[in-house]
Image: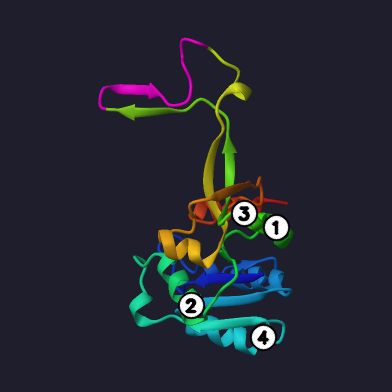
Amino acid sequence: MIVFIPIKHSSQRVPGKNFRIFNGEPLYKHTLLKYSKDEVWVDTDSEEVIAEIQKDKRLPYVNVIKRKDSLKGHSVSVCKLIDDFITSQSIKQPVVQIHVTSPFLKRGTVAKAYQMMEEHDSIASCNLHQVRFWRKEEYGFCPVNHNPLKMEQTQDLPVYYEENSAFYIFKPEAIKKTGNRIGLNPAFYPISHPENLDIDTETDWKLVLSVK
């Protein structure tokens, strides 16, 4: 697999997030070390990440791209980084994009999802929900996926698929066509706790550390 991993030096909500120690390794190395069987590309604005990867003899399979100045900043979409990567490296086969902030995600899970790419142009990891949803409007609350006057069992309700950003897999032409990691013929791959945990807040970090 070709695995693309964006790594920023700074984090807005969780300071030093990518460098925090998890299972004895900085979070980003904990992720990189899982993909020794793959062609890994790291896009980063961090001189520290570049230096550490280059000197770590365990990571010879990791290629580092120093992020262009025009693509730096918290407002730059990861899709722009991916588009630049595909163009600059002339990538022709499907790309797996992951984040280092999903420390429990297994390579085997991603590899199983990758096998679905023959039938789809993209795959996104997701959480499944089969519960009663409501939304708030100006006039009050209204049901989304059920009729309150007809009480159905939750297992009979429509299934909702929530992107959890643990991984995306896509063909280069799909993201070129849509500008999105989810193409026109996608599949959604459910993953469960703790693989679906993502560190986006300090509370998330505490939760990750509490998992045994």
Neighbours of disc 4 within 10 Å: few (<14), some (14-19), many (20+): few
**Amino acid type for the residue under numbered disc 1:** Gln
Look at mark 2 in the image and give the residue it sits on: 44
Q: What is the number of callouts on the image?
A: 4
Q: Nearer the viewer, mark 3 or mark 1?
A: 1
**Magenta segment range?**
138-150
Q: Nearer the viewer, mark 3 or mark 4?
A: 4
**Amino acid type for the residue under numbered disc 3:** Val
Q: Earlier in the sequence, mark 3 or mark 4?
A: 4
Q: CA distance from mark 1 to mark 2?
A: 28 Å
* Residue occupying the point 62% across, 54% down: 208
Is-magenta flag for residue 149?
yes
**Amino acid type for the residue under numbered disc 2:** Thr
Query: Which structural element holds mark 3?
Result: helix
Q: Earlier in the sequence, mark 3 or mark 2?
A: 2
User: Camera-side residue: 87 or 12?
Assistant: 87
Asked if marks 3 and 4 touch (Cβ < 8 Å), the reply is no
Q: Is residue 95 above or below residue 140?
A: below
Look at mark 1 in the image and give the residue it sits on: 115
User: Camera-side residue: 206 or 185?
Assistant: 185
Look at mark 4 in the image and give the residue it sits on: 56
Residue 33 point in image, percent of width and height: 69, 73
Is-magenta flag for residue 139?
yes
Q: Is residue 124 above or below residue 75?
A: above
Residue 177 point in image, percent of width and height: 42, 62
Look at mark 3 in the image and give the residue it sits on: 208
Asked if marks 1 and 2 touch (Cβ < 8 Å), the reply is no
Q: Is residue 61 above or below residue 157?
A: below
Q: Nearer the viewer, mark 3 or mark 2?
A: 2
Q: CA distance from mark 1 to mark 4?
A: 31 Å
